[in-house]
Image (spheres, rainbow, N blue to C red):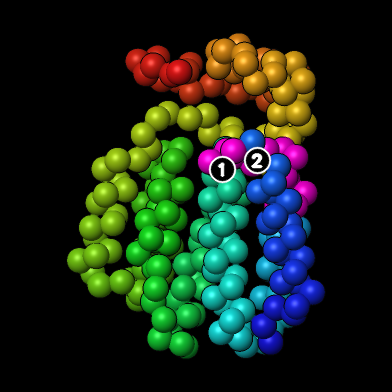
Amino acid sequence: MAYSEKSAARLAALHGEIEARKEHEFAAPTYRDAAALAEIRQTVFNQLESEHEHDRDTVEDSIAVLRYLAETYENMGRTACALPLRKKVLELDAELAARFKNSEGIESDYYCALKARNRYGRDECADLRELAAGLLPLDKQIQIEKNVFENYPMLVRDSVELSEEYLAVIDEVERLLEEECGESAHPLETAQAKARLLSERGILWRSEMQLNPGVLFD
């Protein structure tokens, strides 16, 4: 059974709320959108779990929504939230290809999943590569892996951002940052304030500016 009209309408409404809060088209969502994003995620997984055998529309619609969620979390700096979603998309891709002979978007989904997993350090992604082995021609799979493994991670990032402790407080920290620094503060000032607020909550965090001293940040 596909998403009900009520569920589909709710997902569309939540998406509209998130997009409406953006300052401009290319702005990333913020801590204000955390509850809406969590509800979208829960709605999708509830639907998937409710079906003994997934309806084709359910699979296709879930892939589209989870792609949006994963990209949104990545743009917010919540890579840890995106990682399981990227893998779930690949699993649904596999189901869609096996049951309904539809392989559209698999190359991009595999690339995005590998890239997300290599954002904080080298990850061979054995589980993702095993999934892709049944979905992509070998030469295409190797090409995608080569592209990612040669180019990521592009910067050194603090892996504490992947921890549950960090995720538990980052929405509050970003709210306080907005109140304290506003939008016109220099990135260095904002990073220092963020480090202090996280330290007050027992989390040692280092900014990309600290970890990449040879890189110029605007």
Residue at the spot 74% in from the left edge and 60% down from the top edge: 13
Element type where label 1 sits in the image: loop
Element type where label 2 sits in the image: loop
Residue at the spot 30% in from the left edge and 40% down from the top edge: 151
The answer, for residue 47, to whether it is visible in the render is yes
Residue corresponding to mark 1: 25
Marks 1 and 2 close (CB-CB < 8 Å): yes
Asked if the stretch drawn in magenta spans residue 32, the answer is: yes
Q: Quadrant of the N terminus?
A: bottom right
Residue corresponding to mark 2: 22
Q: In which quarter of the image is the C terminus?
A: top left
- In which image quadrant can residue 177 be found? top right
Q: Provide residue 64's location: percent of width, then percent of height.
A: 55, 66
- Label 2 sits on what residue type? Lys
Asked if the stretch drawn in magenta spans residue 166, the answer is: no
**Compared to 100, does 150 lie above or below?**
above
The boundaries of the magenta stretch are 24-38
- In which image quadrant can residue 29 be found? top right
The residue closer to the viewer here, 159 or 187, is 187
- In which image quadrant can residue 68 be found? bottom right
Q: Provide residue 125's location: percent of width, then percent of height.
A: 40, 55
**Compared to 69, does 187 lie above or below?**
above
- Label 1 sits on what residue type? Glu
Q: Judge from the rendering whether residue 66 lies leftward or rightward of residue 119; answer left or right.
A: right
